[in-house]
Image (cartoon, rainbow, N blue to C red):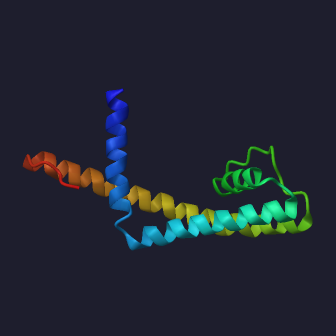
Amino acid sequence: MVAFALLFRSLWHILKILFRQDEQKAIMLAVLFILTIGTIFYHNVEGMTYLDALYFSVMTLATVGYGDLAPHTALGKLFTIIYVLIGVGIITAVIANFSRALAEYHKMKKHHEETGRKPHH
């Protein structure tokens, strides 16, 4: 349980580093925007419930694709092709920024350990 708490503490500090970056805020808005667009599209065109449409949008952008849901219309298939090409780029930017924040966190942590000072995040 202690390890779990320490993990979440570290994650909290990483997220604080991450959201100090204006670029990351813009990317997260882009993620929210593209998920909203996908959810609305799949609900209206493919007739999915909002939850199924959101689920499908997330699985598509995460490139998981369980295969339990799929577009059935030609328009849905064309949209999905464009959606995944744009969306994967946005998700890749989120992952890259998270990796940078993680590296910065570990660099700060190591520096504070070497100098004997407590980090102030």
The percent coordinates of residue 34 (x first, y second) are 65, 67
User: Could one spot residue 100 in this view of the protein?
Assistant: yes
Task: Name above or below for residue 34 compared with residue 112.
Answer: below
The percent coordinates of residue 108 (x first, y second) are 22, 54
Quadrant assignment, res 99: bottom left
User: Could one spot residue 102 in this view of the protein?
Assistant: no
Quadrant assignment, res 36: bottom right
In the displayed orientation, state which residue is furthest to the left: 116
70 to the left or right of 16: right
In the displayed orientation, state which residue is furthest to the front: 50
Give the residue at x 78% y 66%.
41
28 to the left or right of 21: right
Give the residue at x 42% y 57%.
98
Give the residue at x 86% y 65%.
45
Quadrant assignment, res 16: bottom left
Task: Name above or below for residue 22 compared with residue 50.
Answer: below
42 to the left or right of 99: right
| Quarter of the image with the N terminus in it | top left
62 to the left or right of 117: right
Task: Name above or below for residue 38 compared with residue 52.
Answer: below
In the displayed orientation, state which residue is furthest to the top: 1
In the displayed orientation, state which residue is furthest to the right: 73
The number of numbered discs placed on residues in the rendered structure image is: 0
Q: Nearer the viewer, residue 29 or 103?
A: 29
| Quarter of the image with the C terminus in it | bottom left
Task: Name above or below for residue 105 compared with residue 29.
Answer: above
The percent coordinates of residue 86 (x first, y second) are 65, 69
The percent coordinates of residue 43 (x first, y second) are 80, 60
